[in-house]
Amino acid sequence: MSGKIAVLGCGTMAGALIGGLIDAGAIQAEDVVATARAASHRDEIAKTLGVTTSGDNTAAARDADLVILGVKPYAAVEVLKEISGALKVDATVISIAAGVTTEKLLRVWQGQIVRVMPNTPVRVGRGAFIVSPAPGAEDAAREVGDLLGSVGVVVTVPEKLHDAATAVSGSGPAYVFLVAEAMIDAAVAMGLPRDQASQLTVATLAGSAELLAGGEHPAVLRSKVTSPGGTTAAAVAALEAGGVRSTFANAMTACRDRAAGLS
């Protein structure tokens, strides 16, 4: 996928996505126009990403080949309606607005719409993307997937599962960061200097992720670390007693349900 790109509402997630794609060489900064309401934010975007900025969504979207709706969910339909008259017939619209269905978007523009949920590790080329095409946009979704594949893993799911998948990867980095924070704080409470606690925690999480990427089942990997009656067994028992599995299940269900109610 090539051509001009408009990013409407270049917030944290959209900025991370565009920054990752630029860093990977998948797109060129000069081909991107990003919008934001505040002039100070536009100045920050231009400085950070090196892209052209604008306060006018319609002007940015005009003649764009790819339009990314990065606005808040409550505004996604209205912004698409606002720009619909300026869109090229063969343009592709990517919506990263959580909870906003393609059905709602198609009511205001009957073109190629692909629903995507990225996550923030895209900024370092390690993103995870959920892709769900609107009816008739399957070819466009494949092209979008090819583009996003340069900065992460792309998984295409039926739209009915999009919110559930969002609970895994879209919000997933926050769960990992919370676990990291908890591990660091616990280590500090036991006497380790914070910088050493942070270094050990980050290295442990990164290394564990690499092992998981090898394809072995998490339970198998965990069992290899857990000797009978050992220190790890005691720690895992404490986590299980604290309801770690049910807590994660409840958290992810809450995330899915919240996503479904956002628009």
Image (cartoon, grey):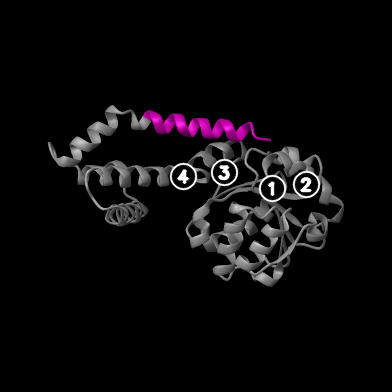
- Please tell me which of labels 3 and 4 falls first in the chain: 3
Residue picked out by circle 2: 79
How many angstroms separate mark 4 from mark 1 (CA)? 20 Å
The answer to whether mark 2 and mark 1 are in CB contact below 8 A is yes
Percent across and percent down for residue 203 are 31, 57
Residue picked out by circle 1: 71
Query: Element at badge 1?
Result: loop
Residue 174 is labelled as: 4
Q: Can residue 217 be seen in this view?
A: no
- Please tell me which of labels 2 and 1 falls first in the chain: 1
Q: Give the range drawn in magenta.
A: 246-263
> Which amino acid lies under the numbered mark 4 shown in the image of this protein?
Ala
Left or right relative to 182: residue 1: right
Quarter of the image that includes the C terminus: top right
Query: What main secondary structure does the magenta stretch of the protein show?
Result: helix
Q: How crowded is mark 2: few (under 14 residues within 10 Å), some or many (20 or more)?
A: some
Residue at image point 26% right, 53% down: 193
Q: Is residue 97 visible?
A: yes
Residue picked out by circle 3: 157
In the rendered image, residue 219 lying in the magenta stretch gets the answer no
Residue 229 is labelled as: none
Query: Element at badge 4?
Result: helix
Residue at image point 80% right, 57% down: 56
How many angstroms separate mark 2 from mark 1 (CA)? 8 Å
Left or right relative to 98: residue 78: right
- Please tell me which of labels 1 and 3 falls first in the chain: 1
Establish if 114 lies above or below 250: below
- Please tell me which of labels 4 and 1 falls first in the chain: 1
